[in-house]
Image (cartoon, rainbow, N blue to C red):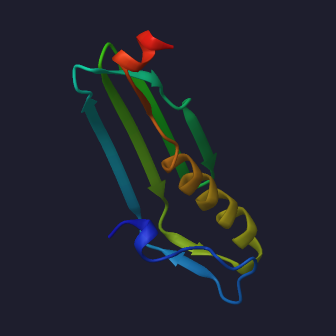
Amino acid sequence: MAWREYHEFTKHTAEKPVSYTHLEEIDDVKLQSPAEYKIETVPPAHEVKKGPLSYEISAASQENSVEVKRHLVLGGMIYPVNSYPALRSFFNSVKSNDGVQIVFQNTQSAKNN
């Protein structure tokens, strides 16, 4: 079960400690654009390491393909109530960077501009 399926971190404060069993997600996704499209922009690499939590994401383009690599590690432990703001910040960063877009442009439209 992916981390986003069981905790949203919508509250600004916690009333109870948060616990996780060890979880690791590794993604390596390759996208090939159709011939009439080119890859215009890819998101910058991003890395966050906070104790037993770590997150890395990067995207690299080559001609009409892009490869996105992502690695998320949640160390299994109980996070006390006072560490909730840092935990929430970490997961908000993960959510934000997971939502960054890759932009494709129609090559015909690019010639007309």
Q: Quadrant of residue 11?
A: bottom right
Vertical arrangement, residue 97 with respect to residue 92, above or below: above
Q: Nearer the viewer, residue 81 or 4?
A: 4
Using the image as rendered, state which of residue 95 and residue 80 is in the foreground. 95
Give the residue drawn at x 45%, y 68%. 4
Image position, residue 19 (x, y; %): 53, 78
Quarter of the figure that contains the N terminus: bottom left
Could you tell me which residue is drawn at 64 percent across and 76 percent down? 10
**Above or below, comparing residue 41 to residue 1 in the picture:** above
Query: In this rendering, is residue 64 above or below 100?
Result: above
**Relative to 3, 49 lies left or right:** right
Work out whether 2 lies above or below 56.
below
Image position, residue 100 (x, y; %) = 52, 43
Viewer-side residue, 11 vs 18: 11
The answer to which image quadrant residue 70 occupies is: top left
Residue at image coords 37%, 34%: 68
Q: Please give left or right for residue 6 compared with residue 49 in the image.
A: left
User: Could you say where residue 57 lies in the image, as x and y percent from the top left?
Assistant: 48, 38
x and y percent of residue 44 in the render? Answer: 56, 29
